[in-house]
Amino acid sequence: MASSVISPVCNSTPLKTPFTSTTKSSSLASTPKPSQLFLRGKRNHSFKVSCKVSNGDENKTVEANSVDRRNVLLGLGGLYGASNVVPLASATPIPAPTTSCSKTGATIKPGVPVPYSCCPPPLKIDPKDIPYYKFPTGSKLRIRPASHAVDEEYMAKYNLAITKMKELDVTDPDDPRGFTAQAKIHCAYCNGAYTVAGKELQIHFSWLFFPFHRWYLYFYERILGSLINDPTFGLPYWNWDHPKGMRLPHMFDQPNVYPDLYDPRRNQEHRGSVIMDLGHFGQDVKGTDLQMMSNNLTLMYRQMITNSPCPQLFFGKPYCTEVGPKPGQGAIENIPHTPVHIWVGSKPNENNCKNGEDMGNFYSAGKDPAFYSHHANVDRMWTIWKTLGGKRKDINKPDYLNTEFFFYDEKKNPYLVKVRDCLDNKKMGYDFQAMPTPWRNFKPLKKSKSKVNARSVQSATQTFPIAKIDKPITFSIKRETSGRTQQEKDAKEEMLTFLELNIDQRKHIRFDVFINADANSNWHELDRAEFAGSYTALPHVHSDPTKPHVAPVAKFQLAITELLEEIGLEDEDDIVVTLVPKTGGEFVAIKSVVITLEAC
């Protein structure tokens, strides 16, 4: 059987087409950086949201300078810095990076380039002649099966498809269907190979996260099916949201039976029957299997329901030229998407890997077949989320719907695709095997026997600012209003708002947030109504090593409307909050914490 030619050694305007060029784009003309304005205290009134927004009719747009700037920074668990908002009045859609792919531009971290080119194979036609993709007609619906439910015949078929994909690396390294070429797609879009308007193109940390990966898997799946002459082949989804799927899928852990589904650069301590941690951020939590499963179901409930009541919190923030990359990630990208990557990737210095290879780093994630099953379930979350009711609907803004990507199909033909064409997975020709979603009914139970006395602890104004979170920190905080009606709750979400964080970008960081929790609580038990959510940050240092490692995060917020109902605090004027460090808390400084009401 052929193996990948990627070395296992670890030393190492709407969006349009990321075509192949070996030159790096020049940077934008120098202007005062928004981050500098932020540090000078000019971070409010002159800034305008620059992406266009829709008034419900995608053909009619209004300039977003009429939108409260708070709504752009509204987010969950990402880096929502002031440097991502610029003082421009009108939107410029991200232009096509037709000449922006640099063979040496992708970096793993400052001063460490990706040891190979992430650029796609050279085009054989003029970029302007690339057509828009049209879905095949009359095809049978492909069904993506749950990873834990597949049989040996399916595993063998999947292994054969990957084997044939890897063989293309040997017979024709420029074949865009090859395993290496497909893995490089993620690297190119995520690690700085492309630039757009002088800025790094990054499909994570914004509303592009879900549609990009959906299109990516769509073509990957069709290529695999074509290679084994089975147009009905569907990628397995790793259903980590179900207790039976909360382990590394068996098909990926049999090196002697299915060698091409196995990746030796995974964390060897997480193989076999080890229950995963959907909140994993570099350190294993010790607990029983039952407690780990319960924690995972609680995280799923919080992220899919409590913390994702509307599109902006689920998908992430708008991404256009003026805003630039990484405006803010959505709930699912934050947790469980990123923790699963880290949980699978190698431990530091294990197998000579220093950067979490393969799954634990964007540049190398596509080298692990488990990556595609992981993202198949992330994709499934998008489909499921829209069935949960309320405001949970797709984004209808033109700057989102008209965003474009570039892929090769199963016949090696290049195509442009639009976000608007991937909103319905069934129209794309695939669906998911039905599986229970127990987290839907896993609303956490209240464990605190009584209300914690707000007068017994310091207030937020007395507690903050703080320079680090090296131990649990408890404080009381005053609400804007109490006893809100259902109509008021529907109009505005109550948000626990952390202002002006400073974090060390070189570190894994996670701290958990609890409301009305007893001081003697077991902080590893997340299956409680008092658990509000987590702040997380991956190491992500700018490619310029001269820039400071400590970066400001303008705002981090958690939706708490439903949570206050669950624990009976709707009528309280003050509530008690506890911050619990899990990883890297000593590298987090917070200026202040308040409660705000935000249009969602």
Image: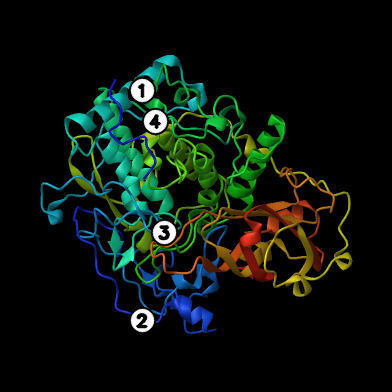
Which secondary structure, mark 3? loop
Q: Nearer the viewer, residue 384 or 353?
A: 353
Disc 1 versus disc 3: distance between alpha carbons? 39 Å
Q: Amino acid at mark 2?
A: Thr
Front residue of this view, candidates 338 and 344: 344
Q: Is residue 203 left or right of residue 78?
A: left
Q: Which residue is mark 3?
A: 396
Mark 2 or mark 3: which is in front?
2
Circle 2 residue: 31
Disc 3 residue type (three-letter): Asn
The mark that comes first in sequence, 1 or 2, is 2
Circle 1: is it few (<14), some (14-19), or many (20+) Cα within 10 Å?
many
Q: Which one is earlier in the sequence, the residue at label 1 or at label 3?
A: 1
Number of the label disc, if any, that sits on residue 159 = 1
Badge nearest the viewer, 4 or 3: 4
Identify the secondary structure beneath mark 2.
loop
Nearer-the-camera pick, 566 or 75: 75
For the N terminus, the quadrant is top left
Disc 1 or disc 3, which is closer to the eye?
Answer: 1
